[in-house]
Image (spheres, helix red, strand yellow):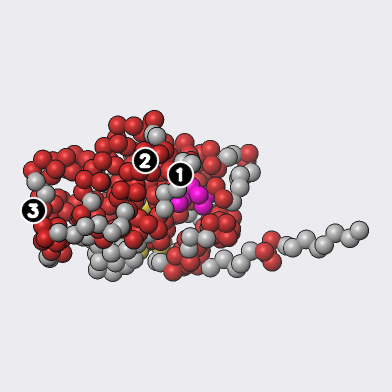
Amino acid sequence: MNNPPKKSEAYLMPKPKFVNKIKFQQEPGTSETVMPSDDMLMYFEKHIIAPAEEECGYGIYSKALEIPIFFVSEKTINQKGLAIDCGVSDDLRKLHDIVDEDRFWKLETALVDRADPIGLYLPKGEFQDQGPEIWVSYEKIRNQHQKWQDSKYTTALTLVHELGHAIMDAPTSGLYCLKTWVEEPLANMIALYYLDSVGPSTTNGFDRMEYVTDFVKTQPEKYALGLNLFRSSRKFDWEAWKNAKWLLCFKIDALLDWVEYIKGNLGNVDDLRLEALFREIVRQPIEFNQTLLQQAEKLYEK
Ligand SMILES: [Zn+2]
């Protein structure tokens, strides 16, 4: 019996489009910013993003080809992080106007932590006029890892995480800080689904999923929760979240319940309880009343 001819890899894989659109932004006045190699970017496209898209089909690959992606210096990504911290301070001023003192302090304690980003998704009109854009600092990732292989997997996870924000992009109630405790774990969940769907990596006998799951565990709580969502027997529907974002200023109690539960139980999360809290956040429709509408009007005022 004749075996069918083997398809060559060149036939199976589309021509790389991703690597050609990446923008490398050197730190002004220098040419020393550490950048990922073309080979690494080709690996992300051919062995992770494109084949994972076949499996998961969330639209990550088309976003990767559509949205400008900048690789920047550690200094630049840190400056962007500071800009986000300022945005969060503005959010808190707005929140102070719409919630009572007790809930305000609870929110402040629950929601505010300083951004120390290795990657960022910047939607149009949030923190800047242009967009959307993705910024990743391979230099910062490289500075945090001794092994090149660890940097490679962290960069792959970061890139897909930022693209996860891109597929969940939707108008919000104008408060960035309310969004992060749901959005960040979901973006990590999506990234873990994508990286997992392409099967084990055999490069140097090093297990890609083992590395990235260990990495996610070391991240701040709201990111680490992504691993719980990824491993959960329950479904955390990122599209339901996307559709619910504009209602967030009406969901402050549900958000606080979610954050407080995670903070108290991260090592011991009950899937059913977590799913119930998530559903409360994404639940639609809600009852509108005059007070809520007045609060919303205040938020949209510039
Ligand atoms: Zn993120």
> Image check: 279 left or right of 102?
right
Mark 3 against mark 1, which lies toward the viewer? Answer: 1
Near-viewer residue (35 or 291): 291
Query: What residue is shown with label 1?
Result: 234
* Quarter-of-image position of residue 260: top left
Query: Could you tell me residue 174's position as x and y percent?
Result: 21, 60
Can residue 45 be seen here?
no
Query: Is label 3 in contact with label 1 (beta carbons under 8 Å)?
Result: no
Could you give the CA–CA distance between mark 2 and mark 3, rounded to whole angstroms? 30 Å
Could you give the CA–CA distance between mark 1 and mark 2, rounded to whole angstroms? 9 Å
Q: Which of the marked residues, 1 or 2, is nearer the chain's N terminus? A: 1
Query: What residue is shown with label 3?
Result: 97
> Image check: 135 left or right of 126?
right
Q: Which of the marked residues, 3 or 1, is nearer the chain's N terminus? A: 3
Q: Is residue 131 above or below residue 212?
A: below
Q: Which of the marked residues, 2 or 3, is nearer the chain's N terminus? A: 3
Q: Secondary structure at mark 3?
A: helix
Residue 193 magenta-highlighted: yes
Q: Which residues are magenta?
A: 190-195
Query: Is label 1 in contact with label 2 (beta carbons under 8 Å)?
Result: yes
Q: Which label number is shown at residue 274?
A: 2
Residue at 29 percent of width and 66 percent of height: 124
Near-viewer residue (241 or 195): 241
Q: Which label number is shown at residue 223?
A: none
Q: Secondary structure at mark 2?
A: helix
> Image check: 292 left or right of 285?
left
> Image check: 50 left or right of 138?
right
